[in-house]
Image (tube, rainbow, N blue to C red):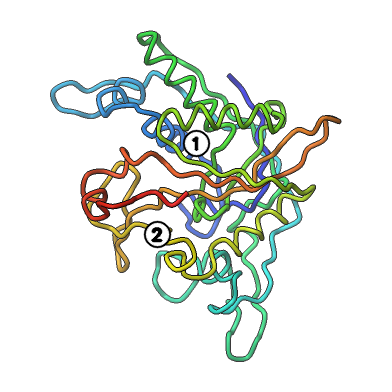
Amino acid sequence: MKTQLRFITPCFCAGANQYVAEIRPSSIRGELRWWFRCLGGTHEQENAVFGGTSDRNPTSSTILVRVSGIQLSNTPYVPPFTSPGQPEAYHNYLLTAPNDKGQTRMWKTPPDDKSKKKGAIRPESQISPGSAFAVTIRKTRAVETKLDELLDWSIESMLLFGSIGYRKCRGFGAWCADELLLTKTELTSKLEKLENSGFFHKFAANSNDDSMTVFRQIEGQLKGDKMQQTGLRLFHKAVNKTPLGYSHGKSERQASAVYFRPCGVKTNAGAIQYSLLTFQAPDIVLGDPVKNAYPDNTRII
């Protein structure tokens, strides 16, 4: 299976050089594993499909992921001035580099909140909207029918709703598979199938010709006290390592189960528009430590 993907929001996904953006097969593979896990794949099934290094029963992967035909847009994403108190801060403030010396992936010289001085971006650290690439996913050997069906559903979901890179929960690194473009009705049917697997979702009724306009709508969704506005939490605190991911370091935290992203929609005339899609991964993949920390409600959508 070979599919052409086009970034509709800026992507910050680094390779060996943390300041240079790179589309890596391992990033696509990791995103596919996330969907497989969230759609109900067990640890044993995940090892059977993606390979595992267990001393008792090591297995090789049944799929091969390749990235090719990368076409980079020459129009970089240039954020406006951002101070911590502005809605845009949820997207554009800092995004620090791992050297912990005040440098950032997004900015060569960060904007200054006091002087209102605009920052200078680091263009090599991003893959701009409009950039495209092909991803090839090939099965190297057969697996049992039910497992193969789960893998196919995971691949389709990733191609329709996936993203990669830093801050992908906030809408960065989102793509659109133009050749798989669906109508709003067709997409809603796919999302309802996801809900059968425990997902929750909200699909905005309005749409826009520009994906970046929808991207900026996310800033308004993220700003403010979500607990006060909705009575529900936006992020779960880090209580232990869970299948969704766990960030170590100065600010240890549970990876968010909630994703915001523009989503491409085919109109009746065959054109493309974008609507804001918000979805939450199933509670089952939050792990018992998180669910025990929030016994009343882990859902926000």
In the picture, measured across the screen, residue 202 lies left or right of residue 209, that is left
Q: Which secondary structure lies at badge 2?
A: loop
Seen at 52% across and 60% down, the residue is 19
In the picture, measured across the screen, residue 278 lies left or right of residue 236, that is right
Quadrant the N terminus occupies? top right
The crowd level at tag 2 (other Cα within 10 Å; few <14, some 14-19, many 20+) is some
Seen at 29% across and 25% down, the residue is 47
Please state the horizontal and vertical placement of residue 62, each as a whole percent of the image: 39, 18
**Precedes in sequence: disc 2 or disc 1:** 1
Please state the horizontal and vertical placement of residue 162, each as a whole percent of the image: 54, 38
Q: Amino acid at mark 1?
A: Ile
The crowd level at tag 1 (other Cα within 10 Å; few <14, some 14-19, many 20+) is many
Q: Nearer the viewer, residue 101 or 163?
A: 163
Determine the residue located farthest toward the right in the rendered image: 269
Spatial separation of the CA atoms under disc 2 and disc 1: 29 Å
Q: Which residue is label 2 attached to?
A: 233
Q: Which residue is label 1 attached to?
A: 28
Q: Which secondary structure lies at badge 1?
A: helix
Q: Quadrant of residue 23?
A: top right
Determine the residue located farthest toward the bottom in the rendered image: 115
Q: Nearer the viewer, residue 97 or 161?
A: 161
Please state the horizontal and vertical placement of residue 244, each as a whole percent of the image: 35, 44
